[in-house]
Image (cartoon, helix red, strand yellow):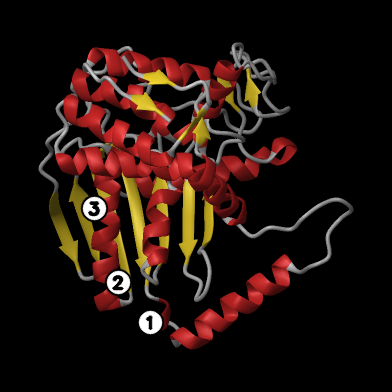
């Protein structure tokens, strides 16, 4: 049975090894175990805990139940210049999306832009995990995905869109990329689950009960509010952008037609879609000019005047700070995740200590 030391911090390396081992024990091939762990660890490393290793138990349930194909045969089914479509064969969403982004980057290296639609995929975790891969290689990366309905429309009282993330990663010559990774809901649903585990109240105007009335009680939350509070029509419209690219353009299911992430059916594939794009900056402007523009933009942003006791940060700055701290100190697992890890270790016969 998995045990934790009296010290509550767990190293990132140990979490990585544990997740890979569990995937392998559950029947996933190496590509699936590697990609799924890589995406979850992106979330945990950068402080996106709602989409980090706390997803492991859910993914294993979907894998062993048959919803996720642990040994998929991914194929490019259409190709037209800088555009292609990948059929993921109900693979784990991380394997599908990493593969698609690699394909998009290859296309962009030839055409200046590469766009890949993904069919028959599944939940992929943090959208930023894929956009940042393009940025690390000198490309601008863009990622969209829709998901099962959990977000009401502005002034609506039913679940309509999913949390429908949008992510953009932009390379910087010296330093970490500019990285946007946002749900188009006020918060992701996994954060509701995290707050339930931690026994914390939700922020105001982020969730609603079954009648669409705002609530801060994570246990009473039946749906999420769209991003924007009183101006939630903006978040709802952005969710529509992700919906169109992820579902309409791929021929996959709209959010309100996707089976719930939390089951009870873990045997039927969900028929999800996603979309990625890579752009080569020097196809538009020479690389030196591009990097100079990004450098000036970020310098002025970070040194701009602030309100009292506040700090201006570029998208991604918080994540890099968290990643450095967690690489040094490790992370603390929330109670529900720790319990789930213990149950997985016992189920698959692991005798290990997280430290």
**Quarter of the rendering containing residue 178:** bottom right
Asked if the residue under mark 1 is in contact with the one under mark 2, i.e. CB atoms within 8 Å, the reply is yes
Earlier residue among tags 2 and 1: 2
User: Residue 142: x and y, percent?
Assistant: 42, 58
Of residues 265 and 170, which is closer to you in this image?
170
Q: Residues within 10 Å of mark 3 (few under 14, many from 20)?
A: some
Element type at mark 2: helix
Earlier residue among tags 3 and 2: 3
Label 2 to label 1, Cα distance in Å?
Answer: 9 Å
Question: Is residue 74 placed above or below 301 in the rendered structure?
Answer: above
Q: Residues within 10 Å of mark 1 (few under 14, many from 20)?
A: some
Q: Which residue is mark 2?
A: 108
User: Residue 327: x and y, percent?
Assistant: 49, 47
Q: Which residue is mark 1?
A: 283
At 59% across and 19% down in the image, what residue appears? 198
Of residues 203 and 265, which is closer to you in this image?
203
Label 3 to label 2, Cα distance in Å?
Answer: 14 Å
At 31% across and 31% down in the image, what residue appears? 18
Of residues 65 and 321, which is closer to you in this image?
321
Q: Which residue is mark 3?
A: 99
């Amino acid at each position: 049975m998995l045990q934790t030391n009296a010290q509550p911090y767990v190293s990132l390396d140990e979490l990585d090894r544990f997740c890979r081992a569990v995937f392998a024990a559950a029947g996933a091939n190496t590509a699936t175990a590697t990609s799924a762990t890589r995406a979850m660890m992106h979330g945990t490393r950068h402080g996106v805990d709602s989409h980090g290793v706390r997803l492991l138990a859910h993914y294993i349930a979907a894998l062993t139940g048959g919803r996720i194909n642990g040994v998929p045969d991914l194929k490019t089914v259409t190709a037209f210049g800088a555009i292609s479509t990948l059929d993921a064969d109900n693979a784990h969403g991380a394997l599908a999306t990493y593969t698609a982004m690699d394909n998009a980057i290859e296309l962009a290296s030839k055409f200046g832009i590469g766009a890949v639609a993904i069919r028959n995929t599944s939940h992929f975790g943090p959208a930023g995990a894929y956009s940042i891969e393009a940025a690390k290689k000198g490309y601008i990366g863009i990622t969209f995905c829709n998901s099962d309905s959990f977000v009401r429309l502005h002034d609506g009282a039913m679940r309509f869109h999913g949390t429908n993330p949008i992510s953009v990663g932009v390379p910087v010559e010296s330093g970490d990329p500019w990285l946007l990774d946002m749900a188009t809901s006020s918060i992701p649903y996994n954060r509701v689950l995290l707050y339930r585990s931690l026994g914390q109240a939700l922020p105001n105007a982020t969730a609603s009960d079954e009648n669409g009335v705002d609530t801060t009680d994570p246990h009473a939350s039946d749906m999420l509010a769209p991003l924007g509070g009183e101006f939630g029509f903006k978040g709802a419209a952005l969710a529509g952008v992700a919906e169109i690219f992820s579902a309409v353009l791929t021929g996959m299911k709209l959010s309100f037609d996707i089976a719930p992430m939390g089951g009870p059916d873990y045997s039927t594939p969900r028929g999800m879609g996603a979309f990625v794009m890579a752009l080569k900056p020097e196809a538009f402007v020479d690389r030196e000019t591009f990097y100079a523009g990004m450098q000036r933009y970020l310098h002025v942003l970070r040194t701009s005047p602030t309100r009292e006791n506040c700090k201006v940060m570029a998208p991604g700055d918080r994540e890099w700070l968290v990643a450095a701290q967690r690489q040094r100190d490790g992370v603390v697992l929330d109670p529900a995740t720790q319990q789930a890890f213990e149950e997985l270790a016992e189920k698959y016969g692991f005798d290990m200590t997280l430290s």
